[in-house]
Image: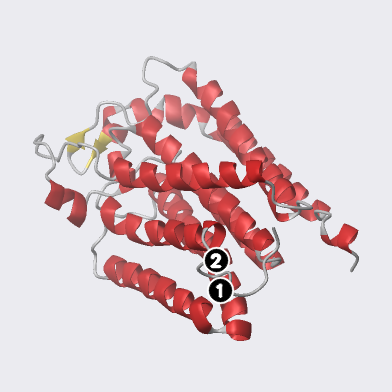
Amino acid sequence: MSEIEKRTMPKGYALLWIVITAVYGIWMTFFMRNTVLVSYETEAQRTVDGYLQTDITGMIGRHWLYPVWVVVSCLALILFIVYIKKVLYAESLGKVTAVICLILLIAGCFYINWYGLLDVTKNDGTPAQFIDKVTYITASMTGLEYPWLFRGWGILASASIFLNTMYCYRKYDYNSKLGVILGSIGSAAIFITVNCPSYGEKKDFSVPRCLGHWAGAALFAVCCAAPLVIFLISKAKKEKGRYLGGLIAFCIVLLALAVFIVLGYKSAIIENIPMTAAYILLFMLNFTSFFDKEKTIA
């Protein structure tokens, strides 16, 4: 394959994101509008774990915000085509690209951890303590009180992780169609979660809202971690050393999260551990010389 062909983005990636954005736009316009602006405003839908939430959508009395959100979120999705083309298939990684990726990486890491410590109210109406945020209050449960901040969480987390994963691929002259596709699916999936408010501590997957929320979150977690794991496996097979160490450490963190979830321990702080680990790993890969023993592409 020539260098020109190597640096040309396959049309399939753009088509994938166009289809994702179109399907999302149709879903939000024709299927979710009444759900968000009518169903989620009823007391029954706003009562989570026996506690009546004030406004789980952030749109009660401000319905004009809904079309604004649909447009903004569609634009956020279509930007992933730019991330792939301008980073993974860039002829070279310039300083501007590096600065943008670094800023988003730091902002994403700061935001998710700050968000996980926001003051929230427990079911009994009392303020949650730090131990509550460690043991059971998840990012999505926090989103019941801060719906717009939760939407920002979804946009920033997906964009910052995906963009920096593409930067990592390009820097090390690596490419994986599976990694790009899985990362795309995971990044898009979080937009389902932020549009389906948390169902609280209980789970009832017969309820579309609960099923959509959990399915989106699970796809986001698995599919956004997969491209980085795929990269580390490929490098570890060839070069071992620090790549193997990074792979083992990252997989241990992911496995620990899975164990916590199976045992019933979940919270925003617990959820943030693997995400923070991903941010740290991407920072070390992209912006330090820790893994730069072998040749990289600047």
Q: Classify the position of the C terminus by image quarter.
A: bottom right
Would residue 218 be visible to someone looking at this image?
A: no
Label pair 2/1, CB-CB below 8 angstroms: yes
Q: SS for tag 2?
A: helix
What residue is at 31 percent from the left and 35 percent from the top?
Answer: 45
Q: Amino acid at mark 2?
A: Leu
What residue is at 64 percent from the left and 35 percent from the top?
Answer: 26
- Near mark 1 (Cα within 10 A), the count class, few <14, some 14-19 or many ≥20, is many
The residue that label 1 is drawn on is 232
The residue that label 2 is drawn on is 228
**Circle number at residue 175:** none
Tell me: 147 left or right of 220.
Answer: left
Q: SS for tag 1?
A: helix
Question: Where residue 178 sits: x, y (%)?
Answer: 67, 67
Along the line of sight, the residue nearer the viewer: 239 or 132: 239
Tell me: 93 left or right of 222.
Answer: right
Question: Where residue 253 sits: x, y (%)?
Answer: 36, 70
Tell me: 134 left or right of 68.
Answer: left
What residue is at 66 percent from the left and 61 percent from the top?
Answer: 171
Give the CA separation, mark 2 to mark 1: 6 Å
- Near mark 2 (Cα within 10 A), the count class, few <14, some 14-19 or many ≥20, is many
Q: Classify the position of the N terminus by image quarter.
A: bottom right
